[in-house]
Amino acid sequence: MITLRCETPEDVPTIHHIHTAAFGRPNEADLVDALRQHNALTVSLVAVQDGRLVGHIAFSRVTITSETGTIEALGLAPMAVLPASQHRGIGSQLVEAGLIVCHHTPYGVVVVLGHPHYYPRFGFTPAKLHGLVWKHDVPEEVFMVQEIKEGALAWTRGVVKYRPEFDVVSPEEETIMLAKHDSLALLHTTRSISAVAMLCLLSCATDHNVFWSSI
């Protein structure tokens, strides 16, 4: 059985290990640590199996700049599942739960750089179709967006920029992050999130101390 909950300070070392193991390098783990240190993790969830952390997903603020000004949105990144626990639907559960929590934040859209055959199942569509582009040149189909506030995409246009902490993952290395989601493309889940679990997850959208009490 998989339990999804907000991260706690005690989870931090294991979250670092999960990302390092999943991506085969420390960059994404260092990214999560940097976001946390700068009070920038808007949503941070972990997956627990048999009392052990096996997965993590993070959402942080991004900016969208157009001729009319700059607004904030959310970006999904990074997400990781321990290699031994992949292909069991854990990644899918993390994405689904994370998006539900995002619906209870003030932001209108979520963007993701990911596999074009994986993220559309959660409602993501190519961002360029909605007038959104990433500041780096990537294939149109891998940079996607989902509306989490009704009507938000109608007035959201411009160039998306992630926080400076993402500089630990250079544009040239983004293909590695994308490749790691390749294996997740086979994940499927038919599990629903219980009402009790949902109440706990929704607290993540309002109780920032859950994420940042160690800062």
Image: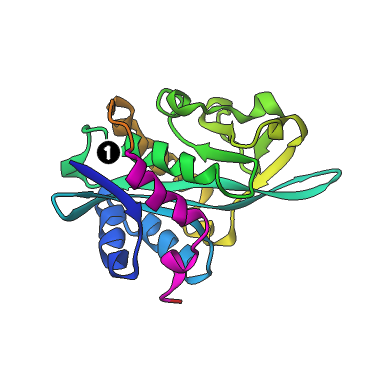
Residue at x 64% of width, y 37% of height? 149
Q: Amino acid at mark 1?
A: Ile
Which residue, given by chain and number where applicable, does mark 1 sit on?
A: 90
Q: Is residue 67 left or right of residue 164?
A: right
Q: Is residue 21 above or below residue 138?
A: below
Q: Please name whichever residue, 72 or 33, is drawn nearer the observer in this view of the structure.
A: 72
Q: Residue reaching furthest front?
A: 195
Residue at x 41% of width, y 76% of height? 214
SS at circle 1: helix
Instruction: Tell me the magenta residue range.
Output: 194-214
Q: Residue reaching furthest left?
A: 50
Q: Position of residue 143 (x, y in %)?
A: 55, 33
Q: Position of residue 166 (x, y in %)?
A: 52, 56
Q: Position of residue 69 (x, y in %)?
A: 82, 49
Within 10 Å of disc 1 (Cα), the crowding (few <14, some 14-19, many 20+) is many
Residue at x 17% of width, y 55% of height? 52
